[in-house]
Amino acid sequence: MNYTMERNPNALPKGYKLKGQKGKVYTIGEVVGKGGCGITYLVTTVEYMQNIPIEVKLVVKEYFNSTCCMRDHNTQIVTSTPGSKELVEQGLHDFYTEAERLESLCGLNSNIVKVNEAFKANGTAYYVMEYLEGGDLTRYCLEHGKNGRLSEGEALHLMSAVCNAVNFLHHNKLLHLDIKPENVMLRRDLETHELTPVLIDFGLTRHYDKKGNPTTSSISSGHSDGYAPMEQYIGINSFEPTADVYAMGALLYYMLKGERPATADERISKYLQANIPETVTEKTKNAILHAMNSSKWERTQRVDLLAEELGIKMGDGTVIYGQTNGKKKEKKKKEEHDTKEWLELLREHLALIIIVVLSVVLVWLFLGRSGHKEGDGAAESVANENVKRILNDKTKAWNVDSIVYAVECSKEGEVETEVQKQLDAIVDIMFDSIVKCGDNKSLDVVKANCYRSALRLKDDAEVRRKLKRIE
């Protein structure tokens, strides 16, 4: 999805104030995307840097079934016909469940779009995502490639990040089912201005249990021509990572060829062999052919195997491409040379090093005996100051990590009575709030994360029992 501004008659009105669950107010801007089950908006909200208000751009996705829903004058979502009520309610439940799951997982992988919150309002559901200003992969190929074609090395470099994201999803029993250039955005680093590929648009994503059965009632039959394998047109009703692997092969083909591959059928292999550019190495060409095999049984079965066939490392953006044995030997030779130089230097100054070490030990023994008592007082003072510094933070930007650190400091030295009371009160409030948040969540993975965070603040038998029941 490239952020192309458009208007939709079913959309929330521009300027509408949408209230989130966390107290945030989002001002609706342009519509930047729409699909069969959702409308995506560019929104703004206000954040405060101490006392200075700053307007921040974000993206909000709304559940709206275009065939069964309509919006009344109060912006409430209603079913278009009485017979569609059950269908819409089930779709709404699945949308919200997937949004909560994405919120709990996105912070664990840098190549998945960040979700700030999921909430219900206006009779439907929403989730708030980061706004990515780097454009999508389609735009990147047009701007940086030759006639839309990237070099093999650059394409593989980008694929490493996509592999990292999709492999993470699969480990968490999620299929994306809509991997394509429009759904790979580029996140621009605010300091270095470097671009990082980020996977977005989880409208078709489905979650599966340990046995491979879908945890939602709907069967995914949505697809994008050129990127979906044949079986996806019928409907994916079990955990099949090969569907995403096919799309990743098609994505790499697009980056190298500069055009969408043909719609999947039994002749796809012949089409690819005739159209993959001649400049592409046999290794990469064979990996694409294997990933896009028309038979899901003969296709590359997992993302890590695709990465291995391509010769890329997932996650760090490093591509094992064009590296020669000569370079490896040269690097090893330099390391051996540096080690020899260091050993020679050590031999020449060994006597001086021994004298310095013995002097330091004697001084430490002398000062340690006379200054032991004063040292304890200093430790106590440092502990007290550390706790006060955290609690007196004017921004009140406390989180579990900072408060846990304050508790650890309070155990290392003496802390003033009033400071300790203030810390204990904050711990109790934060603990109760996190536990309550976990109790109110519907997903076990979100509940468990909340309970683990609460137990970091203080041990509690009841919370441990709750966590054990989930695990």
Image (spheres, rainbow, N blue to C red):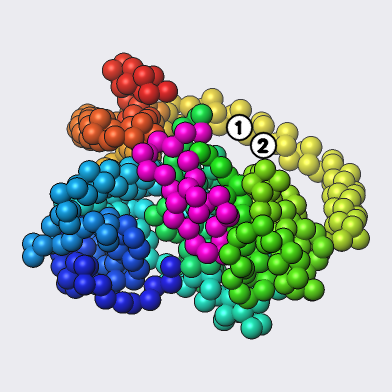
Specify whether 340 is left or right of 31.
Answer: right
How many C-alpha atoms fall within 10 Å of the one at disc 1: few (<14), some, or many (≥20)? few
Is any atom of residue 434 visible in this view? no
- Tell me the chief SS of the magenta region: loop
Residue 211, image x and y in percent? 51, 29
In the image, the segment drawn in magenta is 212-237
Label 2 sits on residue: 360
Residue ID at (49%, 45%):
236
Q: Are marks 2 and 1 in contact (CB under 8 Å)?
A: yes
Amino acid type, label 1 = Trp
Q: Quadrant of residue 382?
A: top left
User: As drawn, which residue projects farthest toward the bottom?
Assistant: 147
Of residue 431 and residue 202, the one placed in the foreground of this image is 202
Give the residue type that dot 2 points to.
Val
Tell me the tag on residue 364. Answer: 1
Whether residue 91 is situated above or below residue 266 in the rendered picture = above
Residue 323 position within the rendered picture, expressed as x and y whole percent measured from the top left: 82, 61
Mark 2 crowd level (few <14, some 14–19, many ≥20, 10 Å Cα) = few
| Left or right of residue 156, residue 241 in this image | left
Does the magenta portion include 231? Answer: yes
Q: Visible in this render: residue 15?
A: yes
Q: Position of residue 105 (x, y in %)?
A: 43, 44
Mark 2 element type = helix
